[in-house]
Image: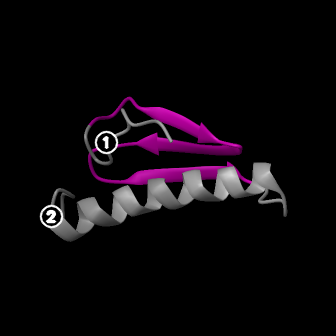
Amino acid sequence: MNDDFKPYDNESDVIRIGDLEIENRVDRVALMGDVVLTKDKVGLALAKELQALLGNIIECLEIGRAHV
């Protein structure tokens, strides 16, 4: 995953995982598109990347960095 992506930090970051596009906003993170998790090393790598991204988003929400 892109370590520079900080959820809810700005209005400009966009990253991709497979064909899934993740757009950063100060009040939301938008996920659009799709990612195919095949049963092989490539699928595993994409799954781990997605897991790391969601973990970062959850962490931000839990510690209150998200604007509510």
Category of crowding for the residue at label 1, using alpha-carbon neighbours closer than 10 angstroms: few (below 14), some (14–19), many (at least 20): some
Using the image, determine if residue 1 lies above or below residue 44: above
Element class at badge 1: loop
Amino acid at circle 2: Gly
Category of crowding for the residue at label 2, using alpha-carbon neighbours closer than 10 angstroms: few (below 14), some (14–19), many (at least 20): few
Q: Specify the segment rendered in magenta.
A: 10-35
State the image coordinates of residue 64 (x, y, percent, origin top left): 15, 64
Q: Residue at x 78, y 48 (%)?
A: 42
Does 31 appear in magenta? yes
State the image coordinates of residue 37 (x, y, percent, origin top left): 77, 60
Q: Nearer the viewer, residue 21 or 48?
A: 48
Residue labelled with disc 1: 6
Mark closest to the chain's N terminus, 1 or 2: 1
Residue 36 lies in quadrant: bottom right
Q: How many angstroms separate mark 1 from mark 2 (CA)?
A: 14 Å
State the image coordinates of residue 2 (x, y, percent, origin top left): 46, 36
Does 22 appear in magenta? yes
Residue labelled with disc 2: 64
Q: Residue at x 78, y 52 (%)?
A: 41
Magenta span: chief secondary structure: strand
